[in-house]
Amino acid sequence: MTGSDRPPSASVADGLRTVLRYPDPRRFGQRAVEPTPEAVANLLRDVRPEAVLTLDEAGWLDTLGTALEVSKTEVPVWPIVPNMTRFVREVTDHGVVGSQIRSFMRLGVPAQLALMLRYAPKGLKLARNDFVTGLLMLVEMDMAHFRGLQVDTVVLGSQITELGLAFENRRLFAEFLRVVRRRYGASAGLMTSNLGLLAGRLAEWELEADVVVTPFNSKGFGMNPTQDSGESAVRALGSRIVALDFDANGTIPRDEALCYLERHDVRTYAVTPL
Amino acid sequence: MSDPVTNSGRLRVAVLGLGKLGLFHSEILSQLPDAELAAVVDADPKMGARAGSIGLSAPFYESFEEMIGREKIDAAFVCTPTFLHFPLVEEASAHGVHLFVEKPFTESHGRSSELLSVVDAAGVRCAVGYVLAYHPTFRRQTDLVREGAIGRVAGLSGTAFHSEVFRPKSGWLFSRARSGGGAVINPMSHLLFLAYRAVGLPAEVNAHNATLYSEVEDLSSVRFSYATGAEGRFVCSWSVPRYPILQLRLEIEGEKGSLTADQSGLVVDLDEPHGELPAGTTRLDLSDLAAGVPFDPAFENNGVMFLAQDSAFVDGVLHDRGLATDARHAVASEYLIAAIYRSAETGGPVSVEPSGGGLGAAE
């Protein structure tokens, strides 16, 4: 084991919970954990996470499903939606509409029917011209791939969260939170590295996320615009915080990293296998 | 530039082309304190409604001509497909608009040189989107080479891998006439720009390209020989699995040490101390090199380098400061790209003019 997948010492880790973050796009091409069901099952046994925070990426969900079965672990999955990296790849090839059609064609028939009933015929046109409707459709298409897995929290990916923050799109957040809670009966999470900005906007818009997944560490790495603003935001937000990069890629000693979380009353951190 | 049109001290910027990169730059510009997103332009009229629904409140126009007739702007970000860069840059330059152009500058070195003359004659600033030059790890690597931390450079080796092309593809990006080429002019160009910025132009290029799927090359293996005796080897492919995000690695060996950078960190190996760096091996993690930023548009996708790039452009134009990715540097590195294509076509080494076709050295 290397870096942040090493379990913390019991004295510091008491009362802290872990979420397994895998795969992490920043680790693509350099991962030491082979994405085989056996390797992932071992990881689940070692880390004993409270949940698996993950993307629907290239066959990964099949691997994860098998690993959960093999390890006899009942761990909920927290989808990060939509997978924008994949979507952007497909937009380059097929355009926005073409990539939506491809995503749709990858779904099973029940999910296709459910989406058609909800969006067709007027909704499809709307989805092309209205960003929020199109986004929710993408979220639903991604979510269809998580069927069969136990999902109790759905997290909006950082690229979309940051886009919504930059353009002050309250409707994007309100609709996402509503759809996740009502349609999936799940907690709604937001992923961001602009925590100060997120806290301010949510307060202004009178919205509250159930979970916020964000870089949080004693180095201030990924805490924008400043570490102080991130710490203040954690105090101000009513949301549960899941700390990403809690040991800044292993550059902060583990106990020091976990003490920092405790000091700021952050009770959950993400473990990211290299 | 001392007189932005608003006299507010903020640079009024238009974004031309609202594809993924145009939208991304719009997002960043909307958050920069010294910039004002004044207009967005896209030839597709439907993009107006779509942009509005995202929350983009800047006025939308269907052409540069229409926009420039109504808006007073200082600068434009050209984010259209490559084959549209030349006419847009030419038109915007004629209006005295400073320019940021997504890479590559144009589809060929010849056209890039010609366009550089146009920009120079118009007296406008122009930068090209070789964004890895603003990545904290690669930027530090370049700085250390230039400061002499590893002494005279003896060799370079680099890789650029991306999982993007696994079957025949259509669209402008896969048409040589419209994009200028494949893996070399796209992912590999970042690596070539970094190598050029660190050590300048080689004397000779020997390249082998392979086309697997479409009409453009999907992988390339390149060897550089420098007049100093240094050697460079670079491999690039956008048809390798496991790299959904472009991953670059550049190792620079010197007489007094070596520097190995990728997007996660920089390994410094020095025979002698340099500044705060001790002799021996030091790993500088990205978290050691990246400071907090006003806004990170994509922290899992190297967002800080895009922010740094756009911020440097705005600052450079407002305060007349140098730009690491100035069009002159871009055209010189694209001269290397042309040499690679020439070598791959002829099947042998080709010589490179020390002046980069009259463009000068890296600095």
Image: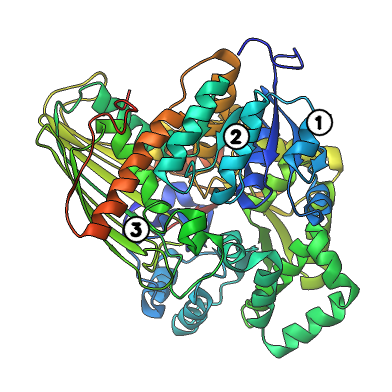
Q: Nearer the viewer, mark 3 or mark 1?
A: 1
Q: Which mark is residue A30?
A: 3
- Residue at x-position 18% and y-position 36%: B258
> Residue A152: x and y, percent?
68, 69
Image coords of residue A19 (percent x, y): 53, 60
Number of residue marks: 3
Under mark 3, the amino acid is Gln
Q: Residue furthest top?
A: B2
Q: In whole angstroms, how far apart are the C-alphas of marks 3 and 2?
A: 42 Å
Question: The numbered mark 3 sits on a residue in which chain?
Answer: A
Instruction: Identify residue for label 1.
Output: B69
Q: Residue at x 41, y 62 (%)?
A: B243
Q: Name the colour scheme.
A: rainbow
> Counting other residues with Cα less than 10 Å from the Cα at mark 3, is it few (<14), some (14-19), or many (20 or more)?
few
- Where does the image place residue B40, in percent across and percent down from the top left? 74, 40
Q: Which residue is painted at 40% across and 69% down in the image?
A: A43
Q: In the rendered view, does B71 fall on the left or right side of B163?
A: right
Q: Which residue is mark 2?
A: B90
Note whether residue B291 is visible: no
Q: Alpha-carbon neighbours of circle 1 within 10 Å: few (<14), some, or many (≥20)?
A: few
Q: Amino acid at mark 1?
A: Gly
Where does residue B218 sit, x and y in percent of width and height?
A: 37, 64
